[in-house]
Amino acid sequence: MWLGYAKRRLMHDSDLRAPHCRNLPLPRLEPGLEQNLIALCEFDHQNYELFFVLASENDPAAGTVKRVAAQSRAKTNVLFAGNPLAAAKK
């Protein structure tokens, strides 16, 4: 019975080694950004979810992030956190 259980578990992502969520703060538009984001979206893990975090919709990377998120196989979220420096001054 134990061997059967172990074999079945190997067919699925283990809770111990598979990421469930990845938070990605994106400070700027950089060379290769789109290819890097696409690579992260290609993971095929059970319950895998990506959060792309930008300061605002005016961020130079926002267009790239939205495009990649819309075409992603993984569940994606695009969040706009606001400018941390402006929030600190208040």
Image (cartoon, rainbow, N blue to C red):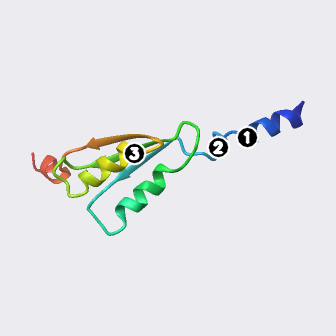
Q: Look at mark 1 in the image and give the residue it sits on.
A: 11
Q: CA distance from mark 3 to mark 1?
A: 26 Å
Kind of residue at disc 1: Met
Judge depth for marks 3 and 1 and give the one in front. 3
Residue marked by disc 2: 16
Mark 3, residue position: 71
Amino acid found under the numbered disc labelled 2 = Leu
Q: Secondary structure at mark 2?
A: loop
Q: Amino acid at mark 3?
A: Gln
Cα separation, mark 3 vs mark 2, equals 28 Å
Residue 58 image position (x, y, % from top left): 15, 51
Q: Dot 3 lies on which element? A: helix
Circle 1 residues within 10 Å: few <14, some 14–19, many ≥20: few
* Residue drawn at point x = 60 percent, y = 45 percent: 18
Pick whichever of labels 1 and 2 is earlier in the sequence.
1
* Left or right position of 13 against 80: right
x%, y% of residue 37?
40, 56
State the separation of the CA atoms marked 1 and 2: 14 Å
Q: Earlier in the sequence, mark 3 or mark 2?
A: 2
Q: How many marks?
A: 3
Q: Secondary structure at mark 1?
A: loop
Q: Residue at x 81, y 38 (%)?
A: 6
Looking at this view, is 19 or 73 the one in front? Answer: 73
Along the horizontal axis of the image, is 47 left or right of 67? right
Residue that extends furthest to the top in the rendered view of this protein: 1
